[in-house]
Amino acid sequence: MHKRPCRCTKRLDQQFFTQFTLFVLCISKTSSMVAPGKLGHCCSWLLVFSLICFVPSAAAYVGLNYGRNGDNLPSPSQAVSLLRNLGMSQVRIYDSDPTVLAAFQGSNIQLVIGLLNSELDDIGASYASASAWVASKILPYVNSTNIFAIGVGNEVLTGFTNASSLLVPAMNNIYNALTANNLQSIKVSSPCSMELLAQSYLPSSGKFSSNYSDIPVLLEFLTRTSSPYMVNVYPWKAYTAQRDAISLDYALFYPNAGVFDSGASYTYTNLFDAQVDAVHAALTKANHSDLVVVVSETGWPTAGDTGEAGASIQNAQTYNANLVKRVMSNTGTPARPGAMLNVFLYELYNENLNVGPASQRNFGLFNPDSTPVYAINFGGSNSGGNGYGYGRRSWCIAKQGISETALQISIDFACGMGNVNCTAIQPNGTCFLPDTRYSHASYAMNQVYVNSFNGTSACNFQGAARITTTDPSYGSCVYPASTISYSGSHMSTRRFSSAQQLYQLFFLLFAIICWAYTGAEL
């Protein structure tokens, strides 16, 4: 961890040097009596360069996987309503069912649409089949649905090997069919398993296995089409398979001694970062370091069979909550500091028809009746309400009509956080009366909200909370207010360090002065 600030500083110093060089060039031209027109041209470019550096880039996000392998699940329209209530703006679905796509129309939720493994034979062997798939599955919805990417298959190279040779041909056919309809902006990728790596410990030693001959052509396709490398990352699986070598604290983002990577001189304090950087190392060794990594699945089960260590509601809540906090810090990983992490949590519902061990049916954030399995704030991956500027006071309280069970889960979650004080709603506390779950949940939610740096996005609680600008305090029960500013959509947020702001302001000021001076001469 001690290396990360050095690398960030190095990048800032490079940015400083570049801008400083441009500025000196302008000054040197002035001293050399360069023609005013050319001087103005130089300084105008400096102004443009400085302004460009202020353009915010896309920030990290946490999305959700929405699977439907259950016989007791809500309808797609109900699921989309739940997703919108959560403020979710990125969702991955596993197929292209018309009823599901129709439900997402007009939702403005960005979608990764799945092409099933069972469809690879036809799509991979025939461009005509791919063209027909695009015509029936994409074109009817493209104008009303925010489609980001097509996920061709899922873990095909490791779990569906009979069709592995057809994976990239299918991706090519889909991409060409999209291009024929002027939809090449829709990315085409294929979620891969971590099993493609021959080695992932230490992270810097990460490399792809030579047992999968289709990896090079897959990476070439992704690079050629500027599509992301999608990978399913499950620290829980690594932990349960190697409990003697991996601590639970390391897997759950709890404070721990960390793992020192001598190959890169980084210290890793959590397994998720280590696994993602192992993928980065493998891509670098394969000469595809420029590929963006999207974590298409990650999560932790709430229950499992005997031998599936660590599967519990508490651990699942801890992993997902800490993961969201980690991603939304927007600091990247030790090997890629500052690079945004794009992650899809697995999954929206518990799916009772998933095959395999019990854990496969217990990754959901929600039960089939849409009650939360546990509470989690998405910490920046949703809007949670309107923006409030500095000085405008706001509070977070429970919504009316929320079930007693959901309210109790929110209370347990909030009061279990280390920086939240719930003594006021204990017996004899100043906010104990009225002794109702709604009142206690409102106080606990607000305590989380005012102690968070995530703005109004901290007021969500699986859709059970809302922002209010009316002070809910009463009698001797005082609700502290928040004056945290919020930028609205996380997709347009960029956090600047103090050093970055100073650098940018310095050069913007001088660029404007230089430009104004030369303009006056002209």
Image (tube, helix red, strand yellow):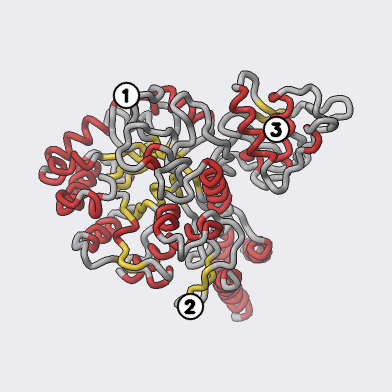
Q: Residue 315: where, in percent of width, then height? A: 53, 47
Q: Residue 44: where, in percent of width, then height? A: 56, 62
- The answer to whether 101 appears left or right of 421 in the picture is left
Write the residue at 88% across / 25% down: 475
Measured Cα–Cα span from mark 3 to mark 2: 46 Å
Q: Quadrant of residue 37?
A: bottom right
With respect to residue 488, does 285 lie above or below?
Answer: below
Find the residue positioned furthest to the front.
Answer: 306
Q: Is residue 126 visible?
A: yes
Measured Cα–Cα span from mark 1 to mark 3: 35 Å
- Name which residue type carries label 3: Cys
Q: Report helix, strand or loop for mark 3.
A: strand
Q: Which residue is mark 2?
A: 262
- Name which residue type carries label 1: Thr
> Is disc 3 surrounded by few (<14), some (14 to 19) or many (20+) residues within 10 Å?
many
Mark 3 and mark 2 lie on one chain; the one further toward the N terminus is: 2
Q: Quadrant of residue 92?
A: top left
Q: Which residue is mark 3?
A: 396
Q: Report helix, strand or loop for mark 2.
A: loop
Measured Cα–Cα span from mark 2 to mark 1: 51 Å
